[in-house]
Image: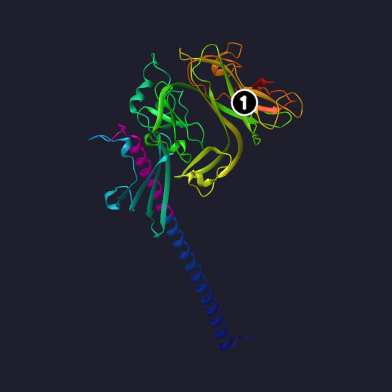
Amino acid sequence: MATTSPRLRLHGRHAQQGAALFESLVAFVFLAVASLTAAQVQSQLRLHGDLARQRSEAVRLGARELEALRAWSTLEAASGASAYAAIVDAETTLDAGTNPVGNADYRIVRRIDDASFAGAKSATIAVEWADRGGAAQRLVLESVIARSDPIWSGALAVGAGAGVPRGSLGRSTGVPVTARSLGDGRSALKTSSSGSAAVIFDDRSGEIVARCDGVASGTATRDLTTGALASCSEGRWRLLTGSIRFSSAVPPLATDANDSPPAVAIALALGGGTYAAPAECSTEAMKTVRHSAGGSLHIEAVPIDALPASLGLASWVDTGDRHVAYRCVVTPRADGRWSGRSTLLPTGWTIGAGNGDRRVCRYAADRDGSGAIDANIEHPADYVDVAGTLQAQNFLVVRGDQACPAASGGDLFTAGLGTVQHQP
């Protein structure tokens, strides 16, 4: 019977003990790495959970600031009342010790831009804080606060009565939305961006009550003030305004006409009575651009050759939209009304039915359901006894051998974009 040497048995026992020790060391290393990883994951989860809580609190603080700004009760500063005039830049700090639901110090920065919109202020609320790791965090909320007298909020609870409809900023719908409010019940509008003439509207009636000359050519409508309108004559006038678009597409689409416009003028032939002066009309080639200012997106029509510097910008995005804006200032008859027909006057091109000519169409729609385009607001061929401002009286110029396009059938948004022939 064979026997094992005591030395061999001792060696085998030592080998087994060494293997067990090695396995224990490997297990310890894995356990240490796993514990360290779990600790790091736990720390990250705690950090992200804490950051989510801080962001939620920042949103609450920013929203509360915006709601406080919207809660103004008077236009001008008054004792014991929040006022629209008091909405200005400001900064506040909220310590963690004074905020029962916060665990960080918050800095609330309010920036107000009252030049981007006529009759409104653009508000940007930035909430800043440092997270648990010491990294700077920032959350921004934006809104627009309109300068609309709170007294008009009661209009939702009462009938319309015998008053006149109101447009933007509580003004008459006869006042163009781009007109600059002068803050005294009147609004001003330049008849041409680079011109020196402007008209002043009565906000309540929508009538032009003054015409001004000598306005600096570099002063835009949005920058008009009573000081810039020094040389004015009072009276009563009416405004006719709209746009002229061009399309060389075959067939043309009433909803897609952005060709670069050729030179064109407009004439308004008055009739149906005696007038103290002929209508004065002007045209201006325009393009539409998009830009950001004060944290808000703006879309504006500017002269076709304008550069971003004209709006105090480093750059803008050209949308590709091209059109001609026209305005006619009409001296009405003694009864305060006017009648007449507007026509386009081409320069360097002809109006006719050939493929080398152009056909003039007018955007028109039967808005009152009478079965005919006969109301002045519907853009008829001839206006009759116009008593107020007429806006959006738009034209479309297409190839002479193409028919004026009708509205797209069944489309709610283009139902009012049909055209009818106007010239020849």
Q: Is residue 202 visible?
A: no
Q: Which residue was labeled with disc 1?
A: 395
- The chief SS type of the magenta part is helix
Give the answer, above or below, for where 372 lies relative to 240. above
**At 52% across and 33% down in the image, what residue appears?**
192
Task: Pick the residue in front: 312 or 230.
Answer: 230
Q: Nearer the viewer, residue 368 or 105?
A: 368
Q: Position of residue 187 (x, y in %)?
A: 41, 29
Magenta residues, as a range? Answer: 48-76
Specify few, some or many for label 1: CA neighbours under 10 Å numbering under 14, 14-19, or 20 or more.
many
| SS under mark 1 | strand
- The residue at 64%/86% (across/down) is 2
Q: Nearer the viewer, residue 275 or 272?
A: 275
x then y, percent, for residue 354: 76, 26
Say which quadrant the C terminus sits in.
top right
Which colour scheme appears in the figure?
rainbow
The answer to whether 33 is drawn above or below residue 147 in the figure is: below
Image coordinates of residue 312 in percent, x first then y, are: 48, 46
**Does residue 418 show up magenta in the picture?**
no
Amino acid type shown at disc 1 = Phe
Residue 66 highlighted magenta (yes or no): yes
Q: Nearer the viewer, residue 276 or 318?
A: 276
Q: Is residue 103 left or right of residue 344?
A: left
